[in-house]
Amino acid sequence: MDIPSVNHCILLGKLVTHPTLTGLDGDDRVAVCKLVTYEVWKEKQSTRQRRAEDLHKLVIRGRKAEGFCRRAKKGAYIYIEGEVRNRSSERDGREIAVTSFKVIWQPQANACGSTTPV
């Protein structure tokens, strides 16, 4: 018997690229952009503040892609929900692993475009 599983993630971060829209009209449209998330902490011994950043590739498909590109701009803080997707490809004779984030839900209105953290 298979045990049910869930592939659901939430990202809150800053867009570091403008969304790029490709494809034809309607459901074939694809928007791609990059989002950075970060974690900040203080070291115990030195009390120095440290920061670790993660860069995420966002992939938005269909009609959502058009709306996302109209509202989301580089530098905006956004909240999105989606699924982690892993694939591998070959480049220069070497196999590389690629992880992307398939957006399944993105709030309307002020969720895109703010240049200050929520």
Image (cartoon, grey):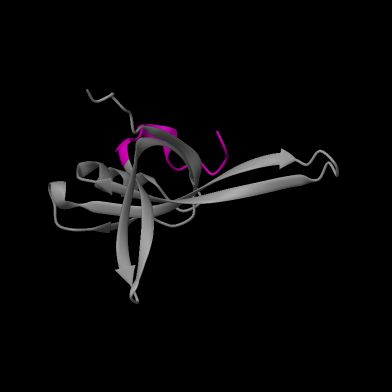
Q: In the rendered view of the protein, which quadrant contains the N terminus?
A: top left
> Which residue is rendered at x = 31% and y = 27% of the image?
5
Q: In the image, residue 2 lies at what x, y percent?
A: 24, 25
28 vs 59, left or right, is left
Report the residue that reaches farthest toward the right: 46
In which quadrant of the rendered view does residue 81 lie? top left
In which quadrant of the rendered view does residue 39 lie? top right
**106 falls in the magenta region:** yes
Q: In the image, residue 111 lies at what x, y percent?
A: 43, 35
> Which residue is rendered at x = 85% and y = 41% of the image?
45
> Which residue is rendered at x = 53% and y = 49% of the image?
54
Above or below residue 82? Residue 92 is: below
- Which residue occupies the foreground of this view, 63 or 80? 80
Residues in magenta?
A: 103-118
Q: In the image, residue 30 lies at what x, y percent?
A: 24, 52
**55 falls in the magenta region:** no
Q: In the rendered view of the protein, which quadrant contains the C terminus?
A: top right
Q: Main secondary structure of the magenta part?
A: loop
21 vs 97, left or right, is left
Report the residue that reaches farthest toward the bottom: 92
Report the residue that reaches farthest toward the front: 1
- Which residue occupies the foreground of this view, 22 or 96? 96
74 vs 41, left or right, is left
> Which residue is rendered at x = 27% and y = 56% of the image?
21
